[in-house]
Amino acid sequence: MLKPKALTRVLEQANTGGIHCTLLLNQEGSLMAFAGKSEKKEHVTAAIAANIWMSYDKNSNATMEDKPLELIVLQCEDGCVAIKKVANLLLCIYAQKSVGLGLLKVKMETLAGYLKEPLSQIAAPT
Amino acid sequence: MDEGLQAVLKKHLHLVDGLRCISVSDRDGVQIVEVHTDHFPTGVIKPIFMGTFAIASEQASKLGVGKNTSIISYYSGYQVIQFNYLPFVLTFIADSKSNTGMLYSLEEDLRDPIGHLQAAVSVP
């Protein structure tokens, strides 16, 4: 059984040191869980992040042979966004520009590793 | 211009450990200049992959954190860094263990030559 409050608390733990918010979304871009300061644009972020992930994943399947896509980092002028697949969901971390790429990557890998097993139990087979 | 840029890219190719390919393409993924080592994932430089960046970059610019400057995609074994110089795209393909910070530093060195290319095609 998925406990939304517990899931949100886990996501919240990543929101330190310049991380604005952490999102969990499905591959269609629908928001599953959110932790962070709400600016009422989480749904837009989720939709865009899922769309970018799906584009890269689809094209890399056709061109990278046996090298699956592991992580995407979008660097923008005022911040950056990291996206990673966990079970059949997507984990998305929204950070300000000052956050180091290495720290962002480690936080993403740690959170994804922690969530992988419980989310795999509720994930529908694809 | 093309030969000059190719020479510049070739000079920079061996400056970072694990860097396999430097490519400049247009927004549709069509190659303009490319230098590479003997072993690199050739599928990455196909237009189907390269063309993804222009659309993804435009969408990423709508995330509310300013204009998208680059996209890093990590695969098992490789990392692909694409820089927004639209209408051109600068792409680095490197081993996943390569130092990403060094690759970003390399991009700073290439800003001028790519900037000249941008200026050459810009409409006044």
Image (cartoon, rainbow, N blue to C red):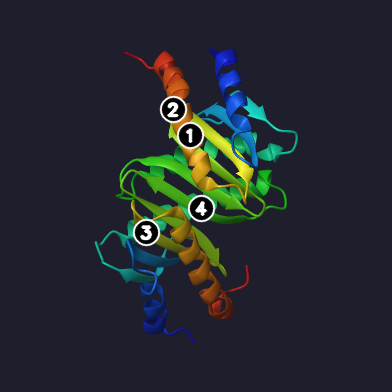
Name the front one of labels 1 and 4.
Answer: 1
Q: Which mark is residue A96?
A: none
Foreground pick, B115 / B25: B115
Residue at 54%, 56% (x, y): give it. A71
Does residue B69 show up? yes
Residue with the mark numbered 2: B111
Foreground pick, B72 / A51: B72
Query: To which quarter of the image does residue A123 belong?
Result: bottom right
Foreground pick, B78 / A90: B78
Q: Are marks 1 and 4 on the same chain?
A: no
Residue with the mark numbered 1: B107
**Quarter that holds the C terminus of chain B:** top left
How many marks overall? Answer: 4
Name the front one of labels 3 and 1.
Answer: 1
Residue at 60%, 47% (x, y): give it. B98
Q: Amino acid at mark 4?
A: Ile
Dot 3: few (<14), some (14–19), or many (≥20) neighbours within 10 Å? Answer: many
Relative horizontal placement of residue B74, taking residue B55 as reference (left or right): right
Question: Disc 1 and disc 4: Cα gap in Å?
Answer: 19 Å
Residue with the mark numbered 3: A94
Residue at 49%, 31% (x, y): give it. B89
Residue with the mark numbered 4: A72
Determine contact: label 1, label 4, CB under 8 Å: no
Q: Are marks 1 and 2 on the same chain?
A: yes
Q: Amino acid at mark 3?
A: Tyr
- Please state the horizontal and vertical placement of residue B118, each as a whole percent of the image: 42, 21
- Give whichever of discs 4 and 3 has the lower sequence position: 4
- Residue at disc 1, secondary structure: helix
Question: Disc 3 and disc 2: Cα gap in Å?
Answer: 27 Å
Determine contact: label 4, label 2, CB under 8 Å: no
Chain letter for mark 4, please.
A
Question: Disc 4 and disc 2: Cα gap in Å?
Answer: 23 Å
